[in-house]
Amino acid sequence: MPDSDYDVAIIGAGCAGLGAGMYAGRFGLKTVVLGELPGGTITQTHLVENYPAFTSISGLELGTKLLEHAKASDAQVNMEKVMDIEKEKDGSFHIKTDTANYSAKAIIIATGTEWKKLGVPGEAEFANKGVHYCALCDGGFYKGKKIAVVGSGDSAVKESLLLAEFGSEVNILVRGDKIKGEPINNKRAMENKKIKIFTNVEVEEIIGEEKVTKLRLTRPISAQEGAPKSDELETDAVFVMVGHLAKTELASKLGVNLSPKGEIIIDKMSKTNVEGIFAAGDCCDTAFKQAIISAAEGVSAAFSANEYIRRKG
């Protein structure tokens, strides 16, 4: 038997989930938000400069404000890991977390993404021993040290700028022929004397003893002016920023249609193909992944869930 019955259960406590929670509460729905990280992954971002109304705000502060707003709208927010969801014969949903059970008339999936891995030798062995995926979380451990960043997108560029505040040098390793961040971030990186950008190169192996000491690359590079070219780059840490994978295992189990990239397919009102299931945020097939878009999709999902519940009586 469920510990509690709700109108809507929201899976995920990031921008999308909290945006949905805020509006579901405002619609008068009995709402629970279930997530593992309060505020979501935006809280691990150093600075956010593209969220309307905030010229510049830390990711932690933005995530905290979203969390407080959802709670102020009478959404219950519980930090629990959702283990399983089953759809009952009456159309309701049974949600099992690591500590409790819930029943809801509708669910909103806002599970976000997880970091992509390089999949090279040494990556798993040296996880948290020089291999990292979050500059804000772990950059402070490398004050005055050599740092490598693998990736070419805006996340890689922004993380490099933050890491340059800690490390003695930051080497960005780009698989393609250029970095692809927002123009203002690209400019900042190219003007930063601590940052060097190497294109058309990939990591073949992460090498170390107790911790990371160097990377084996697909081509020789010169990390310092005047230094001999080598296909090995000495470094104290490598931050992997090669993209994200949508966390959609629960959605797939419920029969929700996924795109070829494994993302939840939604319409413009955040509806999925399964009645009573809505979705929002970076786990969906929206082309442009941004905090403001995730929050807006969460609002659309709450609106659609409210209409669905009212229609069902």
Image (spheres, grey):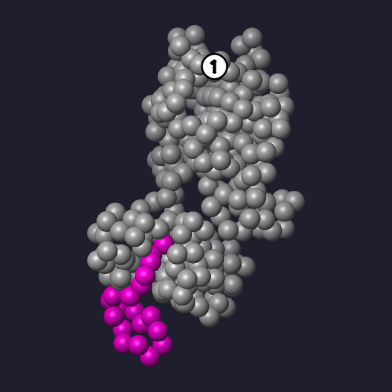
Q: Position of residue 229 (x, y in %)?
A: 31, 84
Q: Can residue 240 be found in the magenta stretch?
A: no
Instruction: Give the total number of marks visible in the rendering.
Output: 1
Q: Which residue is rendered at x = 46% and y = 59% of the image?
A: 138
> Where does label 1 land, which residue?
4
Residue 168 or 173: which is nearer the viewer?
Answer: 168
Where 157 sits versus 195, above or below? above
Q: Is residue 186 left or right of residue 25?
A: left
Tell me which segment is drawn in magenta.
Answer: 219-239
Q: Can residue 230 be found in the magenta stretch?
A: yes
Name the amino acid type tagged 1.
Ser
Where 242 sits versus 190, above or below? above
Which quadrant of the figure contains the C terminus?
top right
Residue 96 or 28: which is nearer the viewer?
Answer: 96
Q: Is residue 309 left or right of residue 26?
A: left
Q: Position of residue 39 (x, y in %)?
A: 58, 42
Q: Which residue is rendered at x = 52% and y = 41% of the image?
A: 37
For residue 207, which quarter of the picture? bottom left
Q: Position of residue 209 (x, y in %)?
A: 24, 66
